[in-house]
Image (cartoon, rainbow, N blue to C red):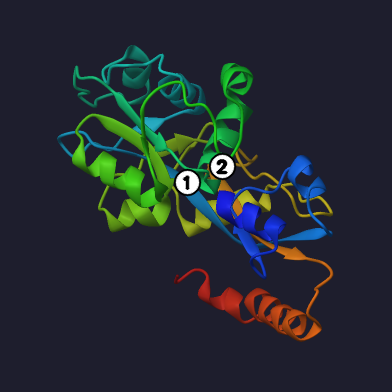
Amino acid sequence: SGGGQKQILEQTVDFGASDGPMSDENLAKAPGKILHIPTVAGAVVVTYNLPGNLALRFDGPTLAEIFLGKIIKWNDSRLAALNPGVRLPNTDLVVVHRSDGSGTSYIFTDYLSSISPDWQKKVGRNTSVKWPTGLGAKGNEGVAGQVKQLTGTIGYVELAYAHQNKLPVAALKNADGKFSMPSIASVTAALAGATIPDDFRFSMVNPPGDKGYPIAGATWLLVYAQQKDPVKGKKLVEFLDWALTQGEANAATL
């Protein structure tokens, strides 16, 4: 996402892509009007590596405390309260986060900012932030790889990477107090609860409703409203039209 935004500004690509919308500041740097075209929505999941194939539950405030470095043991009383009947080990809890500019980080920090005033004040939301604790890894694959290798770790990745690496995925407490698992259905429910402004730069974290998954976001294509090359511009419009009509049918299976 950092690269997608940078390269559309530098006009080295015909369109960029990003899982976090461009800021007003970045849009002001552009030589022309950039449109945000949402294509699909997806889930950012909390994944972890503990012995015993444990199915865990988290809520937003507790996740914020973990990623702020305030919860440092797996058997912390706050985690135990969320997971009655689960034997949590008395081992160190190690955070793994992205080291590169990332839309996955944007969605995750957008969520933490929306539920934790402490996180909002100290860290905030962005594609790249100053992480208070933990190990950095590049890409979703880097975070998934670190979590897979190191016992006691916790990280956040796009849902597909957790599945591909056969990593467990946590249930998260949503705005209605229900524990929700990430799925096409729960992300679709989250999207239905989002408020969409005219410029399509929206957030869908922590949506209202009992079926929505709380850490979800959209992927946008970033396109100049006025195309310099009319022939290429026409082809780009044809592609976008295909993606939003026929291509849409492929989204769920992919």
Q: Which one is nearer the viewer's eye here, 249 or 235?
A: 235
Circle 1 — which element?
Answer: strand
Residue at the disc numbered 1: 44
Q: Residue at x 76, y 84 (%)?
A: 234
Quick check: can you spot residue 211? no
Figure quadrant of residue 12: bottom right
Residue 77, given in percent of the width and then of the height, sits at 33, 13
Q: Residue at x 62, y 48 (%)?
A: 20
Tell me the crowding category of disc 2: few under 14, some 14 to 19, or many 20 or more residues within 10 angstroms, Cα based.
many
| Amino acid type, residue under disc 2 in the picture | Ile
Q: Which one is nearer the viewer's eye here, 141 or 157?
A: 141
Residue 138, given in percent of the width and then of the height, sits at 39, 45
Q: Residue at x 52, y 26 (%)?
A: 130
The answer to whether residue 193 is above or below residue 174 is: below
The numbered dot on residue 253 is: none
Q: Which one is nearer the viewer's eye here, 155 or 9?
A: 9
The answer to whether residue 40 is above or below residue 99 is: below
The answer to whether residue 85 is above or below residue 250 is: above
The answer to whether residue 119 is above or below residue 39 is: above
Q: Residue at x 22, y 23 (%)?
A: 88
Residue 58, given in percent of the width and then of the height, sits at 41, 30
Proximity of marks 1 and 2: CB atoms separated by less than 8 Å: yes
Upstream in the sequence, badge 1 or badge 2? 1
Residue at the disc numbered 2: 107
Residue 34, given in percent of the width and then of the height, sits at 78, 59
